[in-house]
Image: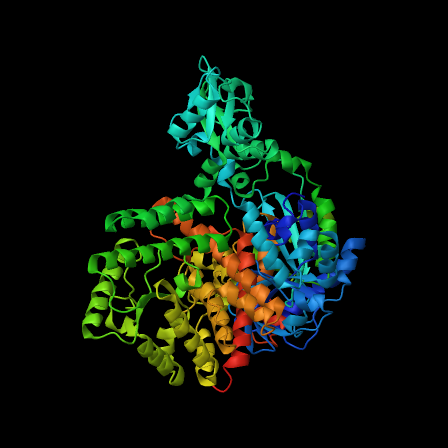
Amino acid sequence: MASELSEIRSFLGDVSPFDRLDADCIAAIARRVTVRYFRAGDTILEAGSHNDQLFIVRSGSVELRLAGEELTMRLGKGGSFAFPSLLRGGEVRNTTTALEDTLVYCLPGEEFHRLRSECDAVRDYFNESETERIRSAVRDLRLKRPSTLQHATIDQLLVHKQPVSCEPGLSIADAATLMSERDVSTLAICEGGRLVGIFTDKDLRKRVVAARTDFDRPIREVMTAAPRTLPRHATAAEAMALMAAGGFRHIPVLGSAGELVAILSATDILAYLGDSAIDTGMLVAKAAGPQALVAAARQIPEGFARMDAGGFHAEHTMRFTSALGEAVHRRAAELAEAELGPPPVPYALLVFGSLARGEQLVGSDQDNGIVMDDRVDESGREYFAALGARISDLLDECGFVYCKGGIMAKNAEQRLTRSEWSERYGRWIANPDEDRILRATIYFDMRAVHGDAVMAQALHEDVVDKARGSGLFLSFLARDAQRSKVPLGFFRNLVLEKSEDGQKVFDAKAQAILPVIDIARTFALAEGLAAVGTIERLEVLAAAGRMARGDAESLKDAFLLVSELRIAHQAAQVRAGTAPDNAIAPAALSPLERDYLKDAFSVISGGLDSLKRNLAGGIA
Amino acid sequence: MRERIADWRFRRRLAALGKSGQELLCAYAGARWPAPDLPLREAALLALDFELDGLARDAHVLQAGWLAFDTGGIALDGAMSLDIRSARRLDDGAVTVHGIGEERAREGQPLRQVLGPLVSALSGRVLVAHGAAIEVEVIERTTRACFGEALPVRAICTLELERRLHPNLVGSDAYRLAAVRARYNLPAYDQHDALSDALAAAELLLAQARRLPADVRLGSVLRG
């Protein structure tokens, strides 16, 4: 009957993993459900008891606490719980209580096991290993990402001028001269406006010079006759497929009347996709003055959005964007020096935080400082004061806005000698207190982008060395990391919507990225590892046996997963012309993405716990 | 006192039914009926809802939906929903509400065939509905018409119960099923499907029962 249990069927059809089952299967499951109701505060399942049901939250929300204490997760509408106990034979480890008045659907354990054995999607979903779920999530996101290649037509790729062409009767020597004069590597050979062949640098090498062909012979004899062509409305993906299949790097593009429009090169495709990052980098490095630098730097967000659209992986997008940011900082320092004259003593421009870690996205403010040689005198300090101010001002114009916390070369406390920096770090480390730690953590991600790299590196090594030896300092760092409130269960049903802070969006940076950075940094400092990038730190920790390989991989995956979402979010903002931020509305994510995020939070939460257990001892 | 008299009258009517000689009715009369002093949480319940073609006293029954449960939970494997045959020209307003048109009504089962499994399901159980007067009245009317005997029914009315739990709410809308459910954080359901409404009433009773003393007796929540 059409109306039978329609409420339960339509609900199950919307929640993971049941949404992947067919209608008949869902109808059968609906019949096996038992509906139960709990009041806020009621215990639904107790740690240590035996369970033989899968619970699905229909309305309200619940909280899971390991052994009744440590918060594991919060779930709202659509969230499933108690399946780990089913997977492990019934033993319940989390005490589950209702946070609000809650209606739950209970599915018998045997039904749960039957679904797992019959349906891969269900099995994957309830897979015990979060690690695997996150890894497949990252893969999924990448596959799903609509690639520009599918949409961009060749027309959009062609930024080039008219193709250079000649008649087939022209001599090889004259043709080569033409190519040389017009600075092209590919020549189109046309007869009465119709394309009859192409001739490339490679042809010149193979068919002319190596074959010792007479230069006076007509080009017709050494050209590639009847080359493969594409119409101008073909997509970039088709062009790439043709290049890959034919093993060539140039394709003539024809207009609707069959006339030659352009020669598309592999480089054109590359430039369209990414880079732009390369072009922008060149513009930055060559910027002759402040205005040129600002103009070049202002292109970075657009290149960033293109990298996202082009299907770049998060780590590459972050690396490229950071590389460009670094180039802007370096050029700003060079231009400032050019204005003020050469520095009186050696110095280095330091960057802290995301740029130092190579994890910058767009919309970041500047975090930098200057380290000066100890021999600097008063007039030297005045020089660096002017230099620092100039650099900060330029960077602000370039889109790296002034740091609200004052961490920039413009400020005197950010311009210290090698010894002064060393002392300052020493004070933070020897005498940590909560307030200082809060302000100081990003200083431990440090890198020189210009100037005396050796001096900067010596400072960094010195800092890492000091930190490793200080248990008190590390325990403060470990405890400070716990300030992040990982929003477990948030996405299931905006569980936190009703929380005290009234928050309705998820801050991808504060709630997911920063905790991973904190975990990696604290463990790395504890081991005296000089690595600065988060992924690099996790890898080095695993390689050194300081962190379980699986834990490091999971944290890395969680970090990349959230980074992918964050990049996609910011790229969309750049495309829409709004200022990039980190506030992701759960509604903008697919149910599957929310599930993946839940796994990521779970991993991050585990990492924070491990940090607390290992390093916060005696303080937390 | 009121409870004891009500129970005495209910059992007298059962006894009379047992003499009807009709198998279905005798089985109903002879079922194990819970005593009024049984704790509510031990009582066997049946949420029931009818869709009618209007509000008139002779309104046709177009659909019946029911499910057995107790205050510990609602198992859905026994949930039942049946369309009932009606050849009457249907009231347009009612059709708009429940969506059962004349064509579908003609394809339903005869009323007598639906009453069979319903009477069996109700045997030994207490009927639960939001505004249970209608369901009780329809059962009495239709069983009298089909079997010559009006079935005695004990019922819990979730609306009446709500007036006891939240006595001072302003406006009759505050006691409508959807509004009451929202008060207990129960999900919003599409109404006017008999089984969905029955499920909605059953879930509501689970929620209301959690507000009553754990040892509340059945007799104290039966409709008067």
Residue at position x 45%, y 50% in the image: A568
Total marks in image: 0
Q: Position of residue B2 (x, y in %)?
A: 59, 71
Residue B19 shows in the view: no
Residue at position x 48%, y 33% in the image: A265
Nearest the camera: B32 or A225?
A225
Q: Quadrant of the N terminus of chain B?
A: bottom right
Q: Position of residue B44 (x, y in %)?
A: 69, 65
Residue B36 shows in the view: yes
| Farthest-out residue, top | A192
Viewed as shown, does residue A333 lie left or right of A224?
A: left
Q: How is the image coloured?
A: rainbow
Viewed as shown, does residue A216 lie left or right of A65?
A: left
Q: Quadrant of the C terminus of chain B?
A: bottom right
Place residue A213 in its image quadrant: top right
Q: Position of residue A418 (x, y in %)?
A: 33, 75
Residue B104, placed above or below residue B73:
above
Place residue B101 in its image quadrant: top right
| Farthest-out residue, bottom | A618
Residue B128, placed above or below residue B210:
above
Q: Position of residue A587 (x, y in %)?
A: 46, 52
Residue A612, placed above or below residue A342:
below
Nearest the camera: B102 or A374?
A374
